Image (cartoon, rainbow, N blue to C red):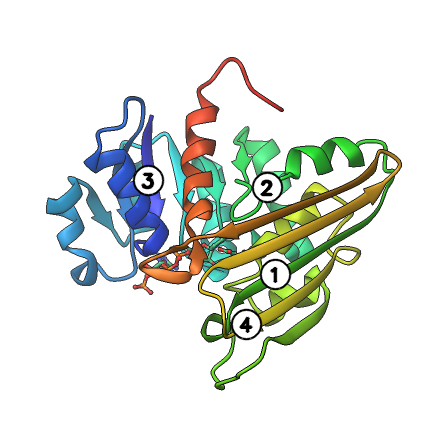
Amino acid sequence: MNIGIIGAGAIAHFLLEKINRHRHENLRISSVFVRNKEKYRLLESAYGVSLYTDLEKFLDSDIDLVVETANIDAVKTLLPSVLKKKDAVLISVGALADEALLTEISDLAHAYKHNVHLPSGAIGGLDLLQNAHALGTVTSVSLTTRKPARSLIEEDIDEAKTVFEGTAMEAIRQFPKNMNVSIVLSLAGIGIEKTSVRLVADPHIDKNMHHVEVIGDFGEATFSITNNPLPENPKTSYLAAMSILGTLERIGQKIRIGG
Ligand SMILES: NC(=O)C1=CN([C@@H]2O[C@H](COP(=O)(O)OP(=O)(O)OC[C@H]3O[C@@H](n4cnc5c(N)ncnc54)[C@H](OP(=O)(O)O)[C@@H]3O)[C@@H](O)[C@H]2O)C=CC1
Ligand SMILES: O=C([O-])CC(=O)C(=O)O
């Protein structure tokens, strides 16, 4: 499968390394959509990709699918055009907290017969949550995220501090680079207004920690992960980048686990 990536930051570099540098058996990144070609010129020789600043030319290049690794604004402005021509994988899932965009995306995906894949990102347990929610019997979903203080706030603190407590909707508004996990969790479960979130800035940790609690008729489930950060962007967990690779590998499979 030939892939086009939007964005060329920490996650994009992870994918270029794992797919192109290590010569992935079934995947190849051939096109990268950027805002500034000069800034990313080295990618062409390092990974054998072509850079594009023109979205239509990028979409008409030799790609089967588009992977977004940019940010929420890029999803809002670019995804509608992408879906008219290609399937898409999104990591800045927080964009879909915007109900109007979610409806537009869903309508376009149906009209143009394209799929939108949302990787689980820096968390897990979404299969359980989706199954438990199938009959509408999940009563509570909560997420507690702890990140190194410097990823969340500028002030120096000595003790862990709750910097946000509220709904996933408000969490992604206030922390668009850190709370995408809360939106994929909401979409898999009971929704953006009902999923509760606590975000803690902790000066004593160097990993991104997520703790999910789900309660419903099925019983109760908890899921905790301590994520190593991506060196190029410590706000972003290594697993988030890996989850895109996992999603891409599963797209072509005939036997799907937990699907
Ligand atoms: N779902 C999840 O669990 C997670 C989601 N994320 C999200 O993934 C996204 C990528 O993360 P990461 O790689 O660490 O981020 P980086 O900041 O390292 O990289 C972002 C890249 O996107 C580019 N970019 C921004 N806007 C556009 C645009 N309109 N068109 C083309 N390129 C653009 C930037 O380029 P430029 O040089 O032009 O600024 C940069 O190259 C972020 O939105 C992050 O919040 C991260 C972790 C977990
Ligand atoms: O990478 C993480 O741990 C989570 C993150 O930034 C996000 O969800 O936006």
Q: Nearer the viewer, mark 1 or mark 4?
A: 4
User: What's the CA distance linking mark 4 and mark 2?
Assistant: 22 Å
Given contact means CB atoms under 8 Å apart, are the residues at marks 1 and 4 in contact? no
Q: Residues within 10 Å of mark 3 (few under 14, many from 20)?
A: many
Given contact means CB atoms under 8 Å apart, are the residues at marks 1 and 2 in contact? no
Kind of residue sitting beneath label 3: Gly
The quarter of the picture where residue 132 lies is top right
For marks 1 and 4, the one nearer the N-term is 1
- Ligand 2 closer than 8 Å to label 1 CB: yes
Q: Which residue is mark 1?
A: 145
For marks 1 and 2, the one nearer the N-term is 2
Q: Which residue is mark 4?
A: 202
For marks 2 and 3, the one nearer the N-term is 3
Task: Identify the secondary structure beneath mark 3.
Answer: strand
In terms of image quarters, where does ligand 1 lie? bottom left
Task: Identify the secondary structure beneath mark 4.
Answer: strand
Task: Identify the secondary structure beneath mark 1.
Answer: strand
Q: Is residue 176 left or right of residue 55?
A: right
User: What's the CA distance linking mark 1 and mark 2?
Assistant: 13 Å
Q: Which residue is mark 3?
A: 4
In percent of width and height, residue 144 lies at: 66, 60
Given contact means CB atoms under 8 Å apart, are the residues at marks 4 and 3 in contact? no
The quarter of the picture where residue 21 lies is top left
Q: Residues within 10 Å of mark 2 (few under 14, many from 20)?
A: many
- Ligand 1 closer than 8 Å to label 3 CB: no
Kind of residue sitting beneath label 1: Thr
Looking at the image, is 25 positioned above or below residue 108? above
Which mark, residue 70?
Answer: none
Residue placed at 26% from the left, 42% from the top? 16
Which mark, residue 124?
Answer: 2
